[in-house]
Image (cartoon, rainbow, N blue to C red):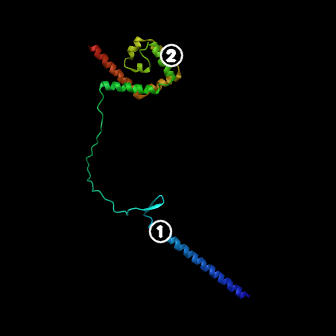
Amino acid sequence: MSKVSYFLIALIITALLFMGAVRGYQFYEKKAAQLEAERAANQQTFSFQNVPLQLAPEGPEPVSRPVLFSDRKQDIFLEEAPLNNQQEVQQAQDTIESILADFREDPNLQAFNKDLKDATDGNAVDLRGLSHGNLSEILQQNPEISAVVTKHMQNPDFAKTIEQIFSNPQFVESIQALQRQQLSEDAKKSAK
């Protein structure tokens, strides 16, 4: 074969490859456009477990009637009725009981309660017994309580526990409520 024949065959093969590439690119563009059209058409479609669901077309949302501006705004605060004396005492006792229950498992406090019970012959069985309003009466009847308190306050762990208990504002407020109640009862007794 001559050089011209090889040249023409190479030219035909190149033309066929070029035309194949153009056809392949046109096929790619057609498929991409078709997928884009399907995606745009199915944009409103919602699928659940790979099953397409057609959502209802969106309609205009209902608009509520306009609300007239009212400059008068009144704050309303709901409060419970104040506690009577008996309820206040009960609440204070419950609060003290709850706070001391948090420290019930403390071994230092258990040792203190045991020594306190032994020293007072059962009158003040624990720290709760000292927390009531009649503390001065208990101290007068049992002066050995101060020795028990002094002995246990030398233990830094016990002192830390007592500080945690007495630094609780609810505990302090409850003790004050019990002492006020005791003072009012003492005043009533002395008036009679």
Q: Is residue 101 visible?
A: yes
Q: Which residue is mark 2?
A: 151
Q: Using residue 130 as the reference point, say whether residue 80 is left or right of it.
A: left
Q: Is residue 173 visible?
A: no
Which residue sits at x=68%, y=86%?
8
Name the amino acid, label 1. Glu
Quarter holding the N terminus?
bottom right
Which type of secondary structure does the marked residue at label 1 adopt? Answer: helix
**Residue 122 at x, y = what percent?**
43, 14
Near mark 2 (Cα within 10 A), the count class, few <14, some 14-19 or many ≥20, is few
Identify the image quadrant of residue 46.
Answer: bottom left
Seen in the picture, residue 120 relative to 177 is either above or below; the reply is above
- Closer to the camera: disc 2 or disc 1? 1
Q: Which residue is mark 1?
A: 38
**Residue 44 at x, y = what percent?**
42, 64
Identify the image quadrant of residue 172.
Answer: top left
Q: Using residue 146 as the reference point, say whether residue 72 is left or right of it.
A: left
Which residue sits at x=29%, y=56%?
64
- Total tally of numbered discs in the picture: 2
**Residue 11 at x, y = what percent?**
66, 84
Which mark, by number, is residue 155?
none
Q: CA distance from mark 2 to mark 1?
A: 88 Å
Name the amino acid, label 2. Lys
**Residue 87 at x, y = what percent?**
32, 26
Q: Earlier in the sequence, mark 2 or mark 1?
A: 1
The answer to the question of whether label 2 and label 1 lie on touching residues, with beta carbons closer than 8 A, is no
Which type of secondary structure does the marked residue at label 2 adopt? Answer: helix
Q: Which residue sits furthest right?
A: 1
- Nearest the eye: 156 or 99: 99
- Nearest the eye: 164 or 50: 50
